[in-house]
Image (spheres, rainbow, N blue to C red):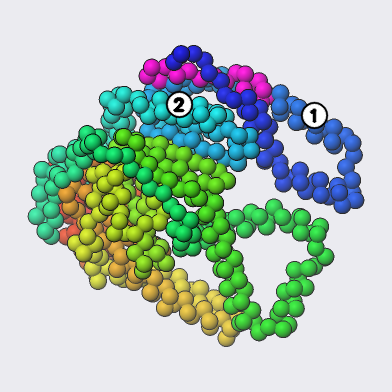
Amino acid sequence: MMNERRTLHPAYIGFGVLSILKGFLPIILISLIRGANGKGLEWYWFAGGGGALLLFAFISYLQWRRFGFWLENDRIIIRSGLVFREEKTIYYSRIHSVNIEQPLIQRMLGVVQLKIETPGGNKKADGILHTLKMEEANRIKELLRRAPSQGRQEGIVTADAEQMSISNAVVYGEVQAESDALAGAAISEGNGTRVGNTGSNAYAAFDRADTPDAAVALDAGKLFQAAATSLNFGLAAAFIGGLYSFADDFLDLLLPDHFFEDIVEDSISHTPNILLIVGAAVLIIGLAWVLSILLYILKYSGFTLRRDGKQVSLSYGLLEKKNVLFDPANVQAVIVNESWLRQPFGYSEVKLQVVSSDKNEQLMLHPFIKFSEIQELLDGFVPGMRVHSASRMSLSPRKALIYYVRIPMLIALVVCASLIAIFGAAGAWSLVLLPLTLWWRISSHRAAGLLLEEGQLTMRHRVFGRSTYYIRRPRIVVMKVRRTSGQRRKGVGSLSVNVLGSPFGYKVAGMDHNDIQPIWNWFSRTLPRKPEQKQ
């Protein structure tokens, strides 16, 4: 029956115990190894550990017994809590995505967790069913997928209205979004910018189209190419740091005293300082690159993208499996990222900003695709978005180059001067930072661009990799124009927009005022006027 009480799988008891033990795992392992090293552990330590395990298991059992959820005609009700009872009611019309995930603990227990995402939540999903059998999780996901479309659309409109009411004040000309039909009726003549209503009914046409379901998969070769060009050194460095801090005590037990110090001293005595530094840098970068490849493959192995009617599902992961179901109508922006290694070969990754409880998360629509094939991908899975020719973009003018270069070059000069003062002639090698920094900032300046066409705003910029944002007008909740007094005299400024479901603004700096003004007039609900300035 639809409204009968349901419970989680009994594996929740093991999930609760393992979740608690996971936080104490380093201490437990270090204590056991030190005990095996001769120091020994008294019997009462084992008795206390066993008693704690029984206590954790008993508490988890009570939590499992108290947990229940009900699937009704228009809502799901979740009740939980041991001391303090909590009840959540989530209407189907408010659900924006349903994710089936299998983190490591659930994978060990042979179950999955189901996360229900709604707009306006916190970093956690609004509804989490931690231990379900895969069959039951799929049945619940299918039930939510077949929720009445009319109710779902009403929930989307309500969420948009709630969010946009917050941004009612005008700051640098912050204005609310209107319908795409009104945006399409406006024509701005500044700088030859065209605004049409093409694509305003794309989602409706997509829903009505009698087209076969689509599917995209990433084979092993493409996955390795994507991993080799991802260059996620930050993730690799964090992993190495965490692994080293975790293993530091084990290394002290297994290796002789002063092992690393002796290696460093021997290396310095037999190798010139410059070669040692270069060799160490190459070794670290190589290890980070290899580790980055392995982590990427573990994360995106088995990547599959499917469209079933109005819903799109994607799944990936080797150790921790993830299955996400979302409605394309909830996509707020499309982000195309091109890394330094991918851009020369015409490859990129495509992400989506989707309204969910985790506003920092972006869904990976495709991790490795040719730029020329992105439009075909969007037509099949995210209709209404257009990849316009980059040759039609308005680029950052030459007069704005100084604003890209001056601060990074100043920082590079300070770093070089400090290294030379500390290391003398050897520190002069740091001067190579100056041309590298200049080249980086010039490439960032050349990448910046804006395009307003067919009711869609396209923004492009570069930090390290090049990123392009595609945003339709109804998805923009805040638009800001910023410029200093010096930039105002030169006629340049920066433009940023915020979309529903993201705490971050998409920004392009150093653009000509004549390129920003038509976009401002297009977005403003009043007659064309100049945006407010602020020093």
Q: Count every numbered label the image shows and give the total.
A: 2
Residue assigned mark 1: 51
Q: Secondary structure at mark 1?
A: helix
Q: Is residue 142 above or below residue 29?
A: above
- The residue type indicated by label 1 comes to Gly
The percent position of residue 520, horizontal first and vertical second, equals 19, 50
Q: Residue at x 76, y 55 (%)?
A: 249
Q: Nearer the viewer, residue 7 or 393?
A: 7
| Magenta stretch holds residue 64 | yes
Residue assigned mark 2: 140
Q: Which residues are magenta?
A: 59-75
Name the image quarter holding the C terminus. bottom left
Q: Nearer the viewer, residue 294 or 534?
A: 294
The percent position of residue 370, horizontal first and vertical second, equals 34, 59
- The residue type indicated by label 2 comes to Ile
Q: CA distance from mark 1 to mark 2?
A: 37 Å
Residue 399 falls left or right of residue 63 = left
State which quadrant residue 331 falls in. Answer: top left
**Tag shown at residue 340:** none
Q: Is residue 207 above or below residue 419?
A: above
Within 10 Å of disc 1 (Cα), the crowding (few <14, some 14-19, many 20+) is few
State which quadrant residue 17 falls in. Answer: top right
Residue 410 falls left or right of residue 310 = right
Q: Residue at x 67, y 30 (%)?
A: 14
The percent position of residue 385, horizontal first and vertical second, equals 25, 47
Q: Residue at x 76, y 46 (%)?
A: 29
Specify whether residue 77 is in view: yes
State which quadrant residue 55 falls in. Answer: top right
Specify whether residue 529 is in view: no
